[in-house]
Amino acid sequence: MVLPVVALVGRPNVGKSTLFNRLTRTRDALVADYPGLTRDRKYGQAQLNGQHYIVIDTGGIEGQEQGIDKVMAEQSLAAIEEADVVMFMVDARVGVSVGDQVIADHLRRLEKPVFLVANKTDGVDSVVASSDFYSLGLGEVYAIAAAHGRGVNQLLEKALKPLFNSLPDEEDEAGLPTELSEEEALADRQAEDLANLPIKLAIIGRPNVGKSTLINRILGEQRVVVYDMPGTTRDSVYIPMQRDAREYVLIDTAGVRRRGKIIDKVEKFSVIQTLKAIEDANVCLLVIDARMGISDQDLSLLGFILNAGRALVLAVNKWDGLDTDVKNEIKRELDRRLGFIDFANVHFISALHGTGVGHLYESVEGAYSSATKRISTALLTRILEMAREDHQPPLVRGRRVKLRYAHAGGYNPPRIVIHGNQVNSLPDSYKRYLMNYYRKALEMTGTPIRIEFREGE
Ligand code: GDP
Ligand code: GDP
């Protein structure tokens, strides 16, 4: 699975945040901002034609004219390092500045694709405004207006297309019947594949929540031979293991085996590595520290997991030695802040003592099974009929919304495609009703579900 990383760099005020917000908004904007961990770097998830990618906003590069070290703040260099593509933004209204030249000198020496982006070309002649920047020696100048979106899609297509395995050609929104059966067949094949593969289980969490301790505990019980599996995901360690008859690949983002080599614990936590692990996993085990409560960082990790559509199990760790009233307070906080993911199982564990760890597998397997089990068109359509009978779809402009039939569009997460008329006018409340109805009828736990609507016969 390819999850390309795009870094936005440039002097302050050229419009990086504006572009970042525009890109990450295309799908529920979720920003992992880790102050102290990543300094000014902000990570967001975005989509182009249904394919996910990561955007890094580097804040400002200083723009002082005293050599590369001063000009390129440390975090910008790190972001460039992490990126597959660099978008170097300049301000078309200001023209070439000395700071731009210093940054360009650095970028020219990289082995990475760099796209020179002239922003703020709204209300000015974009050809004239961008011609100045050819002198930076980075080739083509892409004129955009981040604030209005002009030129942004063309730029993305150009920059990202080579990175995705294969972009789906012009997706047919109408979904013609002949293609439908093809889509169902594809989904069927996916379910078949997933049934025969090991469960890729990523252990996700902020620094110090106890990931390494948990992995050591799991491996200690398993007595497996640990080796690094080559993979596209940088840095995470892939550990094959077995539990009862079930095969797993544990994705270790904490770097258990590299412990000791790493002195600075904070530095070993990499957002990109974590995001790639989430994307690559079938199931994510999100570890939360009972002693720290639920932080915004926990919530943004959770957001990334849900956005990626991964199955989810929650482990509240360090449950040992807590007073009953503290435990009750934590449970109340969980209900309050994580009530919206009531479909996921929560385990209270002590990785240190091993308490509760064995039961995690039941939830992981349950979540995987819910996320990947084949669902027939007949069953999905039958459930749709039942939902319709219990509670009719509303009238829109005097006509009742028609929901005809449903089929699976894919798994992990399960995608249910519903066909009908006027489906685009269906209110959110009815969509939620259908979602809950399907969740109950299919007895799905531990996985997000996606429902898509298609207009037509
Ligand atoms: P950053 O410091 O590089 O992250 O820059 P910001 O995204 O904060 O933008 C700096 C200023 O430029 C803000 O006032 C934006 O509203 C403005 N800006 C960003 N993009 C555009 C654009 O496409 N056109 C115009 N006219 N202004 C823009
Ligand atoms: P990581 O950064 O997420 O890999 O966290 P570590 O596994 O390195 O754990 C951070 C600290 O929490 C260490 O001092 C562990 O001993 C401690 N710790 C981990 N799990 C538990 C637990 O279940 N109970 C208690 N009391 N401490 C724990």
Image: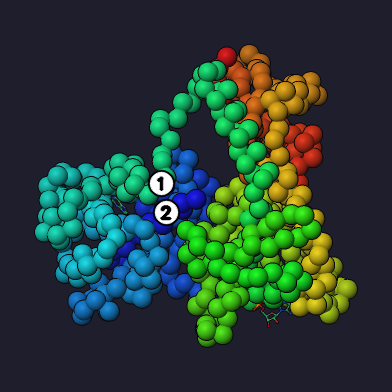
Q: Quadrant of residue 395?
A: top right
Q: Residue at x 41, y 46 (%)?
A: 164
30 or 249: nearer the eye?
249
Residue placed at 72% from the left, 23% from the top?
378
Q: Are there few (<14), some (14-19), or many (20+) residues within 10 Å of tag 2?
A: some
- Looking at the rendered image, the quarter that the C terminus falls into is top right
Q: Is residue 252 above or below residue 85?
A: below
Point out residue 445 in the picture as x, y percentages from the top left corner: 76, 46
Mark 1 crowdedness (10 Å alpha carbons): few <14, some 14-19, many ≥20 = some
According to the image, label 2 marks what residue? 4
Amino acid at pointer 2? Pro
> Answer yes or no: do the residues labelled 1 and 2 have beta carbons within 8 Å?
yes
176 lies above or below 111: above
Q: Nearer the viewer, residue 191 or 308?
A: 191
- Determine if residue 384 is in view: no
Residue hosting label 1: 164
Between the C-alphas of marks 1 and 2, the distance is 7 Å
The residue positioned farthest toward the right in the image shown: 324
